[in-house]
Image (cartoon, helix red, strand yellow):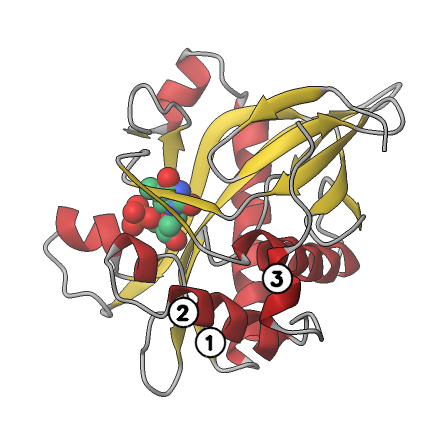
Amino acid sequence: MARRRKLYEGKAKVLYEGPEPGTIIQYFKDDATAFNNKKQGVITGKGVLNNRISEFLMTRLTEIGIPTHFVRRLNMREQLVREVEIIPVEVVIRNIAAGSIAKRFNLEEGTPLPRSIVEFYYKSDELNDPMIAEEHITAFGWAMPQDIDDMMALSLRVNDFLTGLLLGVGLRLVDFKLEFGRYYTEDSVQIVLADEISPDNCRLWDIETNEKMDKDRFRRDLGRVEEAYQEVARRLGVLPEAGPMDLKGPKAMQ
Ligand code: TMP
């Protein structure tokens, strides 16, 4: 294959120029980080599994009319997406207290929240993703009030839909993080769901045992990290047939 231009390398993915203008290839790495890069490691097969899990969830969301950047999966570790201008705001939706909200308000992990709570964080590694209010988003020009309304409404629809879908496979959607982008066409601009939806950016607990089936296993050194990602993929019916050997997949081209 011809060498292609690397546009950006993040902590879990590499973005390459796509085959046509306006497209990008997302390559999913096995690298895992936590606590803003302070903890680093490798979750073998994670890239292959997240590529499939995100493909599956984005496709289901497209089917119910949620606009996303996803076009199609290309191979084990890559998917084609539409080029969007990423809004530098991480939208976190929470159903059950866990992680930072449990700490901040001294709630016991696992306490159901009175209703789903949407939070915003400024996407900046340098600043350690500080929590922000709508005021900051509009005052600093990261997005317009209408964009925020769109992101909120889409996030809540995604939450409702994914909560049900995951419940169907025995997983509780505790919380998750979404990113959005502006998709420009000739005569319009639309807010679309971007990035990925995977156990890297969701908290998923087994409905029966409350066992953590997501990146918290890596963050908190709980062990059986690979197995948790595989189990999520298996329950969603997207585990590659060939099993763990297959999960090594091809390497990123430099
Ligand atoms: P938190 O409880 O640490 O704030 O995380 C809330 C959710 O957001 C959880 O599902 C993990 C996800 N998340 C990310 O995807 N990226 C991040 O950088 C952080 C801090 C959380």
Q: Which of marks 3 and 2 is in front?
A: 3
Q: Mark 2 points at which residue?
A: 213
| Mark 1 or mark 2, earlier in chain | 1
**Where's residue 148, x and y in %?**
52, 32
Q: Which of marks 1 and 3 is in front?
A: 3
> Which residue lies at the image location 44% right of the left edge and 70% below the top edge?
228
Q: Name the residue under label 3.
A: 247
**Where's residue 16, x and y in %?**
71, 27
**Where's residue 213, x and y in %?**
40, 69
Between residues 225 and 21, which one lies in front from this camera angle? 225
Cα separation, mark 1 vs mark 2, equals: 8 Å
For label 3, the crowd category at 10 Å Cα-Cα, with few meaning under 14, some 14 to 19 and many 20 or more, is many
In the rendered view, tell whether residue 202 sits above or below residue 242.
above
Q: In this view, does 129 lie to the left or right of 10?
A: left
Between residues 72 and 110, which one lies in front from this camera angle? 72
For label 1, the crowd category at 10 Å Cα-Cα, with few meaning under 14, some 14 to 19 and many 20 or more, is many
Cα separation, mark 1 vs mark 3, equals: 23 Å
**Where's residue 142, x and y in %?**
49, 18
C-beta proximity under 8 Å, tags 1 and 2: yes
Where disc 2 sits, the SS reads: loop
Q: Tell which residue pokes out farthest to the left in this image.
A: 106
Q: Within 8 Å of ligand 1, the CB of disc 1? A: no
Q: Tell which residue pokes out farthest to the front in this image.
A: 245
Where disc 1 sits, the SS reads: strand
> Which residue lies at the image location 36% right of the left edge and 24% below the top edge?
125
Q: In this view, does 67 lie to the left or right of 119?
A: right
Q: Which amino acid does label 3 sit on?
A: Leu
Q: Within 8 Å of ligand 1, the CB of disc 3? A: no
Q: Name the residue under label 1.
A: 171
> Which residue lies at the image location 44% right of the left edge and 55% below the top edge?
43
